[in-house]
Structure formats: structure tokens, C-alpha cells
Image (cartoon, helix red, strand yellow):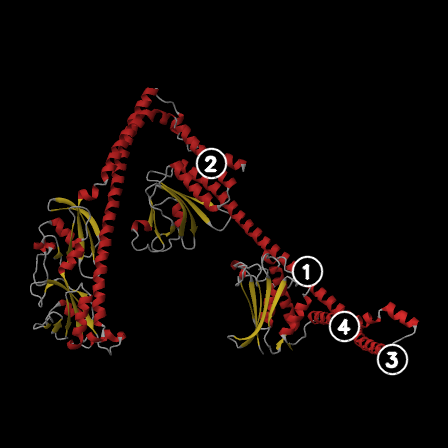
Amino acid sequence: MGSFARVKWWKLTRLLPAGFKGEYPLPYKTALLLWGVTILAASITGCISYQSVRRLIINNLERNALLEVRERGNNIDRWLGTRKAEIQLLAHTPPVRSMNWSVAEPYLKSEVIRLEKFQHFALIAPDGSYFTTKVGKALINVSDRQHFKKAMAGEVYVSDPTISRTLKKQSIVPISAPVWSNSANSIYKTAEKPIGVMNGVISIDRIAEVVGKLEYGPGTYAFVLNSQGVPIVHPNAGLIGNIDKPAPSLLESADANLANVAREMVYQKTGILLTKINDTRVYVAYLPLEQAEWSIALVIPRDNLEKQLLPFNLLAVAAAVLAAAAIFAAIAALKLFALNCSRTRTEALLHRLTGRIRACLHLDRILQTTVDELGTLLKLDRAIFGWYDPRQDTLEFSWEYCREGLPGRLGIFGVPGGPSGDLAARLHRCETILLYKTVAPDRGTSQEHAYIELTNSHYAAVPVLTQTNRLGYLFACANRRFATPDEVEVLEAIADSLAIAISQSQLHGQIQEKLTLLEEVLAKLRRNEEHLVQSEKMAIVGQLAAEVAQEINNPINFIYGRVLHLNDYIKDLLNIIRLYRKQYPEPVPRIAKEIQAGDIDFISQELPQILNLLKIGTDRIRQIVLALWKFSLPDEANKVHANLNESIENILLLLASRLEKKILVVKEYNNLPPILCYPAQLSQVFASLLSNAIDAVNSIENYAQIITIKTNIVEDSPGRCIAVSIAHNGSRIPPEIQHIIFDQFGHTKLFNKFTGLDLSVCYKIIVELHGGSLKVESPVQSQTGGGAEFIVKLPIV
């Protein structure tokens, strides 16, 4: 790494201009020369910058004005579109489709009141005769009207303004829609002719009112032209014309500028231009309407639009004064220290890049830092890193530095006309290349964003050779003569450093992926090992429990059987003693003394009770041993019938030592039919769920600890099922883990102390072996605000 850095350091230092290594003239001559050159350059740069920024501001203001016109034009379009939709909806109503005026007249008159934007409605027959809501049957014919012809051709049409034949001397805008017969199929309407026309009339004053709301400061005005360039809305009433009252078209205006604007509008173009109308410099923003064959324009006085340039002009003057003062003060020092600054920037770039490589292995951060530092050091317009795809002959620009004010150029670019096959070679030779985006730009996106022009001698492209199969390119572009040998050497040095950084980052990423995968595998192995150990332990415990239960069962049965006989024998002896005392109430002194010492009366009362307790105890032992024996028996190869109520009772008997007096077990059993199942495995599931419930209720204080067990027969989607619910009022199960507790290794620290079967094993026993379902609900209604309920459903077979 040290030798590499020394070589690249030597290359970077060669960037220093050779002119600085020679002898300089006298200091004052040098300062004078530098002063003159700097002033000239600063003046030219200032003028160009001022004009460029001014042009950018004006372009921005023009775009804002055009956007304002577009927004208002959209409002007009939406307004007209709403009127067209209302007429079209009326044309589809049954009264209008009947083409019977006596049926349609009441309905249309009510709609005139509701739709107040229309003056009246008309129902026109195919021959041009019509009825209106104003005069009833009209005595004239409209078969020559354009809106009637368009509607009979199947089109919903907004006509140019005309003079109403019903309402004399009123300028109106007819909106017409075809009326189709009720039997007409919408698919075949184009093959049939309408049975009539539904017509709505809007006053031109309504259109003028909507257009009049379009303004952009004082002195602005809007006008609308039809497809022939005749104004239909204009502040100058003398220019307005309509179908029945023709007016001169603005295309033939004596004002060439106005005629040019009208021509752009008639051609349905969108734009804004600075022109002179009536000897006044104005901006005209224009665009076509979609709902009618009209175009709308907004005339904005030049001062209205450019008044925002005044602060910029003042700022430019102030900046020029300050820049001139700064040039006079610092010109000599800047030039004398240029060599030092260049060396410092070069060294700083190398140190920064080397530091980034050592301190950060994140690929995005390394590449973005590289292009930023490169663009800053060499004062570039753009510095871009991209991946080259030789198969598609495209460049994917993913990281970029661009000078302030320039738009971004990220994306996938290729040579127009398909793969050229020699793009890499052309880039290496720095030929002039025009790269276009391989996907079409979005609507509304300027076309200038769709391409990148790489001009000969204004850019350099250096390949970045990584240890992977991908080939990168580092681009440096400037709006000046670029790609000198020294500058290319700088780029090559940076590209070599960048290649090492990319390789290190990719290697680090691969190592991290492998480490993550290894950690996941180790964690799974640990969980598998714990699960296997626990399963083996439980299997051994079950086997030992079965053997112990078998060994205990025989002597307990022997004792239980003898206790029954002993009870009978004692009863017989006590009866004999009572009879003896009746026959011989006065025994001999020696016997009387023994009777008194032995307290025969107490023994005769206490002995039966002791024998009864012995019987109850041995019976209890027999039940526990039997339950333990049944629980620990291995499953049969085939399913057998079993009663779930009895299985649950056996589990409760085994868990009696854990069910302390403070835990209340509420049993709500229903009569259940025997179910075909694996009894031992179901018993293990219920034992696990009950053990879990006991652990949960032991975690609460200051509340009654309650476990509720319910069994019932329910109707489910597959058929009748037996539902077993085990609920408790203990700690709740958080919602975020309820959906994973039945997954293998999915239970969290909440179940670390759980000594029963894994919940995933319980789930497999219920769902896979028995075709049932197991779900959890938490919290449940309880005073503690927590609790959980496990619901097992098993189909009745």
C-alpha cells in the first residue's frame, strides 16, 4: 500500500503547472499584469454569469406564468368537461331516450333548475326539429348547425359561440350529445345512428366569466380563440365573433406579432413568448383546451413578470462592486500562492480518499465522496461514476457531482440507434458522444434531461478495473478545454484508488453476508440441539414414569384390596364386642381394667374412620398412578377413540401439586362423544397448555388467579368439531408475537421458562396429525387487563 501511494503521489504532483517553475519578472510588473488579466476575466465572467442567471430567473418566471395559465386552463377544461358530462348523462336518461317531449319536458325543466349553469335544454329530432324548455316546440330547424351534425355523428361536442335561434340576439355556446335508443347495445353504438340529440345552452357570458378570472397582476387580460383564430372571448368586444356573426381572424391581423401568437394558438401549441402587441412589450402565455376546439391566452405586461429581477439587479451591482474590491486586494496573493493551493488541494484529495478507504467500507459513501472531491478539486461541471454493460453497450450513471444550477443526469444511457459495439473504445479516445436515456422520459419532463452530450476535449473517461466482472468508468466533464495529460493522470490515480476501495467494499460485504449466514446457522443449530435434548429428556422421563407407575400400581392395588377386607373384618369384631358387652355387662375385674385402659369406646368410633381415610388415600394414589400411566403410554400405530373430558381430568390430577389453593380452576364441560385420535399426544398438548397457563397466572398479584377450561361441540366450516378452550387471566401475549409463537423456534423470551412441549410441536399435533386448528387470543376480558386463551378445535370423525 505504501509503494502504491508513493507512485500515485508522484503522478498527482505532475498536475502542477510547469509555468510556475520558471523565473518571474519584477513583483510589481507581475502584480500589474495579473491585475489587468484578473479584472478582464472577472468582468467577462461577471457579465456572462449575470446574463446566465438573469436568463435562468426569467425562464423560471416564464415557467411559473405558464404553469399558472395551465392551472387556470385546466379549471376551464374541467368546467367544460363537467357541462359535457351533465349533458351526456341527461342523454342517457329514460325520459330523454323516449324522444317524447311530453315525457321529457317536466324532467328537463326540473334539471334546468338543478343545473343552473345552463340557460335551457333542447331535445332535437333526427330531422333537425326540436323542442326547448323555454318555448316548447320551436318553429325553426337546426339541421345545419355544426353541433347537431357532430352529435348525430355520435360525438359529445362543445360548439363555437353562435346566436340563439330561440332566444333572439343572445350569444350562446351549445353543448350537444347523441341520444341512443334503449335497445342499442353500447358495443355496437358506433354502427347505429342516434335517435336524436340532447342539447344544452350556456351563455357566452358564463365562459367569459370563467376566463375573466385568469389574471397575473394588473394590466393582464385573457382571450380565447376558436379553431379559425377568431376571438370568442376578448376584452375588446369589437374583435369577438361567432358562427352567425363572423369577425376577422387574428391570423390576418395587421399586427404581425399578434398574428404569430394566433398562429401558434390555432396550431394547438403550448408556450410563452415575449413579443410586442399594440406597441407594448408583453409576455403571452398560451395553451389549447381539451374539451373544446379553442385555445386560451394570457397577456402579461413585461413589467409584471420581470419586476422580481429588481432585487437581483441590485444584488448583481453590489456583488460586482465587492468582487472588484476583492480582486484589487487579493489578486497578487492568489496568483503567488496558486502553486501552493494546487499542491494542497491535490494532497488533501489523496488524503481524503485514502482516509475514506481506510475508515469506511460502504460503497455508496466511497463513490459519492470520490466524485464530490474530484469535482471540487478540478472545478468540474460534472463528475460521474457509472457501470458499463458491454452486452447492452449502456452506461448506468449512479453517482454524480454536478455544479450548482445544473440538473442531475442519473440513469441508464446508451448510444441512439441501438448498441454501437465500440462505446468503450470511443470513450477511451474521448470522441464526441451523445448518450440518450434508454427509457423514454416522463411526460412533462424537459427533453434536455433525456440525454448527456460528451463533447470532444471537454471530458475525460477513465476505466475503473475492479476484481469483479463489472467495469466502471469515472467521468470528468467541464465547460472548458479538458483532458490534458496531467489531468488524465490525476483521474487515473483516483481511478486506481477507487478500484481498491470498490474491491475492499465488495469483499467486506461478502464477508458480512457470510458472517450473518453463519450466525443464523449457528443459532438454528443451538435451538435444534436444545430442542433435541429436551425431547430426549421428555421421552426418557415418560418411559421412566410408565415403569414407575406400573411398579407402584401392583402394591397399591394389593393394599387397596386388603383395606376393603380389613374394613369388613373390623366391623365384624366390633359387632362381636358390642354383643359381648350386652350379654356380659359386668366383666371380671381384670377385663374391666383392660377395657378402661384401652378406651374401647373411643377405638370403636375412631377405627372405622381411620380405615375409611386409608381407603380414600389408596384410591387417590390409584387414580394418580393410573393417570400417569395413561399419560406416559406410547401412542398406538392407529387412532383410537377417547373422551377428551377424561383426558383433561387426568392432566389436572397430575398437575394437582402445581394447582395451589390460590389458583381457581373453572370447569365448564359439555357432554362430548368419543373422538378418534392419538390420546397420548393430545394429553401432552393439554398438559403443555395447562402448564403454560399455571406459569402465566403465577406472574400476577393482587388479583384472583383463574384458569377456565371449556369443552363444547361447535359447527365449523369443515363440519362439527369439538372445541377445547384453556384461558387464564395472567400475563398477556404481545400482539407482535402472536402470529409467530406456533412457528418452529418462533417463541420468544416470554416462553423461555415453559417446560412443556414446544408450541410448534403442539401445533403440528393438532393441525397435521388430527386435522384441527390451534389459535391464541390475547388479551381476553379480565380484571388484570391481560390474559390469553388457547382454542383447540378437533373434527368429529
Callout 2: helix, strand or loop? helix
Res 350 label = 2
- Where residue 281 sits in the image (x, y, percent)? 15, 44
Tell me which label, 2 or 3, sits earlier in the chain: 2
Tell me which label, 1 or 3, sits earlier in the chain: 1
Residue position marked by numbered label 4 in the rendering: 612
- How far, Cα to Cα, is label 1 from label 3? 73 Å
- How far, Cα to Cα, is label 2 from label 3? 127 Å
Residue position marked by numbered label 1 in the rendering: 533
- How far, Cα to Cα, is label 1 from label 4? 45 Å
Q: Amino acid at mark 1?
A: Val
Vertical placement of 263 versus 309: above or below?
below
Residue at image x 24%, y 54%?
Answer: 71
Callout 3: helix, strand or loop? helix
| Nearer mark to the viewer, of 2 and 3 | 3
Q: Residues within 10 Å of mark 4 (few under 14, many from 20)?
A: some
| Nearer mark to the viewer, of 1 and 4 | 4
- How far, Cα to Cα, is label 2 from label 4? 99 Å
| Nearer mark to the viewer, of 4 and 3 | 3
Q: Quadrant of the C terminus?
A: bottom right
Q: Is residue 269 left or right of residue 256?
A: right
Tell me which label, 4 or 3, sits earlier in the chain: 3
Callout 4: helix, strand or loop? helix
Q: Amino acid at mark 3?
A: Gln
Q: Amino acid at mark 4?
A: Asn
| Nearer mark to the viewer, of 1 and 2 | 1
Q: Are marks 1 and 3 in contact (CB under 8 Å)?
A: no
Q: Quadrant of residue 553?
A: bottom right
Q: Is residue 259 left or right of residue 780?
A: left
Q: Are marks 2 and 3 in contact (CB under 8 Å)?
A: no
Res 583 label = 3
